[in-house]
Image (cartoon, coloured by chain):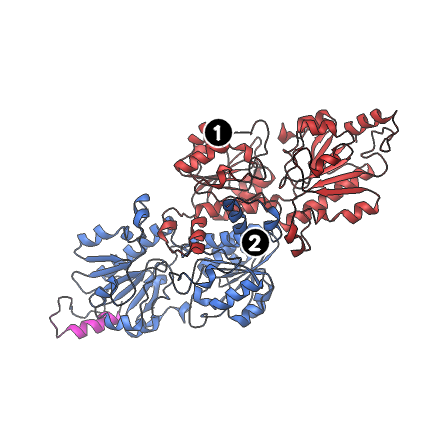
Chain colours: A blue, B red
Amino acid sequence: MAMLRAAKHAMRSLGSTAPEAAPFSRMLHASPGSKKIVGVFYKANEYASLNPKFVGCVEGSLGIRDWLESQGHQYIVTDDKEGPNCELEKHIHDMHVLITTPFHPAYVTAERIKRAKNLQLLLTAGIGSDHIDLKAAAESGLTVAEVTGSNVVSVAEDELMRILILVRNFVPGYLQVIKGDWNVAGIAYRAYDLEGKTVGTVGAGRIGKLLLQRLKPFNCNLLYHDRIKIEPALENEIGAKFEEDLDAMLPKCDIIVINTPLTEKTRGMFNKERIGKLKKGVLIVNNARGAIMDTQAVADACSSGHIAGYSGDVWNPQPAPKDHPWRYMPNQAMTPHISGTTIDGQLRYAAGVKDMLDCYFKGQEFPAQNYIVKEGKLASQYL
Amino acid sequence: MAMLRAAKHAMRSLGSTAPEAAPFSRMLHASPGSKKIVGVFYKANEYASLNPKFVGCVEGSLGIRDWLESQGHQYIVTDDKEGPNCELEKHIHDMHVLITTPFHPAYVTAERIKRAKNLQLLLTAGIGSDHIDLKAAAESGLTVAEVTGSNVVSVAEDELMRILILVRNFVPGYLQVIKGDWNVAGIAYRAYDLEGKTVGTVGAGRIGKLLLQRLKPFNCNLLYHDRIKIEPALENEIGAKFEEDLDAMLPKCDIIVINTPLTEKTRGMFNKERIGKLKKGVLIVNNARGAIMDTQAVADACSSGHIAGYSGDVWNPQPAPKDHPWRYMPNQAMTPHISGTTIDGQLRYAAGVKDMLDCYFKGQEFPAQNYIVKEGKLASQYL
């Protein structure tokens, strides 16, 4: 496989004496020798020791430290990713591989890419690589890959939980309990069954399909919008209806779930105007990306009651600042970015990262569906 | 249909001049003439006017006031049900029908039944009549009936929500958001996928079956214990395994859901000893009845971590007092009793109560599955 950055890097290095210089080979992922691999994960502190399977944190380091070091590679792991003096900045100039996650995203800007002269590979431990400037990465010849499929079940399950939390008005009930109250009416006046409601998903890729399958026994009216139709057999099994025109689908929905990646097309897609056309009292679940929504427009619509409930685990930016309006808007059921980082999900994406590193060291291809940027080209869902 | 209390009452009244006296007839539900019907519901106050479909509260009065009064009946509705001076007590001596709900239960004791000399019919708006002393009701010749099926979907959906809330560790995530925090690790270290876990339901009646059907696409290992096996076709469709021996099933479960009525056999069923035999880290969902659990044993096991999460909407007693230990135990996701009183559920059980009152006035049978006590006998699930 050709790797433009490796090629460019190798050609740049031909005349230098830098130890990482290597002869250009179109067949090699990595140039030979010791690599410097940097991982940016969330820190677990006191939680790290509570579960031996907790590999997704700084302390767990994806469980690949011994394996990497036994092969002579250097493995730096940190959660310190912001500002000119952060730990990540110290390694930008000489790292070969950067592993990041959507849960505690290290924003890989064009400027950082420019300074990362040895960088060849950007791996996302999880799914969703929009914290990386993909255009800059493509232009610079980098390979970007994620562990496609690693946590799609985790996210789909979490979406169904959030649908039910909003439909059933769970949060005010829980808050009554911990405050010592008991007021059934204050919950029941806006609690509904999911059965019989119209649920539409914006995007029916891997996660959207899994969600629709899990919704099937709830006897809802299921709609989906995507660039491409679901294969007929599966569509028939699920009983979901394809809606070619997004803006025709949205006003039909009692519940809208966002299952589309963040791209230049989807950024700010749910602005004031589009939200204004939704059914009054609509419920929205968004575990995709916070920037797909206009932050203030969502907060305003929750305050006015036009949106009757909003739940998700994605924010813009992340971590969400203390004054983020979604923390304080009414009828929200938000969490930090957690849906894809269950213990089961962590074990799968840690294994996927290890497999890709192994391919990289051996000059082998990654699984085709994992590539986000390959040979200067973006994967189709990011176009 | 014979109604012992109507008969006894009529015979008692034969020599009296009481206006409610009526000739005895085995064919009549109600003696002719105006009836005094009392309903005990939760009060909605400021929430009453927010939703025209909110019929389950005192203010909504099941939406049957005009219908009852147009036929010359008296309809008293209150939420005031406790103590010697409460509103309910004023009507005990001369009411003919008492409508109660599990959400704000009026406890119908043997002593109250003894004083309710005109009482013929006890209707539960919803499902679950254990707030009534059923033995005393049977001995006294009363008919007890509920709106079987009215909110089984509501409860089953809510159970699946609670399973996911516990498995995914939702509540600590939400609390971080409203407190201005962001600590993914503090949630993720004990968040899991539902996929692949073993879920067992104690009871697979109407609600248990609906839950199992909704769990099917989650690819769990599904177990159930009941007095009777699910019909083979449905069992095969769901893929759940029958466990004849409860205590053999329970230690296999990662997640246990309680779907059995409160009876003398199930009261206190989950005591310290039985909880001690469960898998360490088990999650428990109980929307059935609080008294099936030993309150303190659950609180202690949540504190020790033996139970890793407990969620439900039923308490003993209800409303739960401010110092109920389940309000303060770790890893709880409790709410007041709401799962069966969604707006959709309310509309169904209000319609069911109206239908039964209509049958009662006309001397017709109720739907067979609605009877809890009929002609001095308890329905099979309460034996």
Magenta segment includes A19:
yes
Picture quadrant of residue A251: bottom right
Q: Quadrant of the N terminus of chain B?
A: top right
Q: Amino acid at mark 1?
A: Asn
Instruction: Please say whether residue B2 is visible from this viewpoint.
Output: no
> B87 or A111, which is in the foreground?
B87
Marking on residue A259: none
B328 left or right, relative to B88: left
Number of marks drawn: 2
Q: Secondary structure at mark 2?
A: helix
Relative to B268, is A72 above or below?
A: below
Relative to B83, is A203 above or below?
A: below
Q: Secondary structure at mark 1?
A: loop
Give the image location of residue B382, x and y in percent. 63, 30
Which residue in the protein does label 2 denote? A167
Residue occupying the point 49% across, 66% down: A228
Magenta segment includes B65:
no
Give the image location of residue A351, x and y in percent. 31, 52
Start and end of the magenta stretch?
A3-20
Residue occupying the point 15% across, 66% down: A20
B150 left or right, relative to A140: right
Which residue in the protein does label 1 denote? B271
Residue occupying the point 72% across, 47% down: B61
Instruction: Return the chain for callout 2.
Output: A
Q: CA distance from mark 2 to mark 1?
A: 33 Å
Give the image location of residue B13, x and y in percent. 85, 27
> A367 or A77, which is in the foreground?
A77
Q: Amino acid at mark 2?
A: Val
